[in-house]
Amino acid sequence: MSVIEIGQAFGFVSSFTNSAATIHTVSIITTMLLLTELINFFNISQLLASYKMGGIASLLTPEGMLLFVAPIVPVLLCLEVLALGLMRKLRLHQYKTTVLTHVLNVIIGKFLVIDALAFVLKHLDHVSPFKTSMTCYWFIYSYVVWEFSQFVFHYSSHKIRLLWCTHAPHHTPEHINLTVAYSGFFLQAIVAYAIRCGICIVLGVSFQMLMLIILLDGAWGGLLHVSEEILPDGRLGFLKKWIMTPQHHRIHHSRNPEYIDKNFCNFLSIWDHVFRTYQKPLPEVAPDYGIARKINANSFIQMYFSEFYYLFLDIKNTKGLKNKLLYPFMPPGWHPQLT
């Protein structure tokens, strides 16, 4: 809903004839917009729409119950901030750049006319030789396929310079908390959906199964970023032998030489074991969060754009058209003289 539409709905547009009314109107409209974004942030709008259309019965269907999964991470984020505040361990500067990143991505996202999932469905749905059904054994198959697609996307985002530029804002924060789950360059989500959903659809995962897995995996992926103050150990007891835990993901966010480019999976660690990128915590090596390049992690501009800037400098300063064309597709840290 636009500002004008909100103003018309509440009869405010005509009140812009004097400055006092204008200030009052702008404050009310701003409040309405913030309330709308808050509802969207908690993914409440779909719940309300479903209830409005079908009442409580619509929320008891499989589709309706899935709507309760989406707000999990936003709610836990608020609980994390509240708990840290009560414990007097809340450091607002640790949240600043990641929150700004999320806000910018939301604003830009509203003006994008790209629906990566619809594009992939349109062009790849007919390629699959079979389609999964909503059964337990197909769910297991689909989740393993999804984890493979997640590994491909995530590994590529670390090994292809241009993709790393979109992924680096997610790794720049030097402290882990739930807002980090929302940080990243705005194009990253489009690339992620194109790669992950494309692989899943080609390998037979149905649209309904894909939506279920995206919701469940998204909720778990957010939980992996829980603050160390809230969950200091992060290993989740015996579960660490079977699934990726917050401690595993803290390793992934670390710039220690022993931990760089490790633990790409989200829930099941199967593909990290297959491709030998799995890394368990080393007692003598505490995670040092951030990226290898030294930047001001509290600067939104550096966090969001610095990798693109340095890629531009590398392309500009290197000699030869071939090398200039190679830079966006080679791994971070690659230079022609090193080959």
Image (cartoon, rainbow, N blue to C red):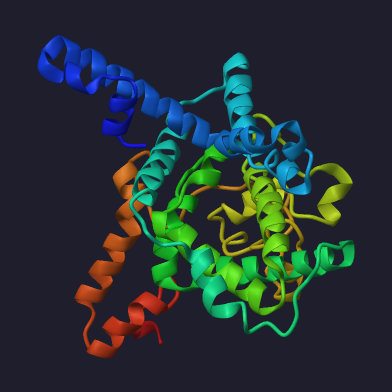
Residue at x 72%, y 42% (from the top left corner): 64
Q: Residue at x 32, y 24 (%)?
A: 30
Q: Give left or right: position of 179 versus 321.
A: right
Quadrant position of the N terminus in the picture:
top left
Front residue (pair 178, 262): 178
**In this rendering, is residue 164 above or below 106?**
below
| In the foreground, 41 or 297 | 41
Who's the residue at 61% across and 14% down the image? Answer: 86
Residue 147 spot, x, y in % from top left: 70, 65
Q: Can you say whether 277 is above or below 104 in the image?
A: below
Quarter residue 210 falls in: bottom right
Is 170 positioned to the left or the right of 317 in the image? right
The answer to whether one can see residue 177 in this image is no
Which quadrant is home to the C terminus? bottom left
Location of residue 208 in the rendering, given as x and y in whole percent from the top left corner: 70, 61
Q: Residue at point 30% right, 83% down?
A: 325
Q: Residue furthest left?
A: 18
| Most distant residue in the top direction | 20
Q: Quadrant of residue 322?
A: bottom left
Where is residue 111 shown, x and y percent of the image?
33, 51
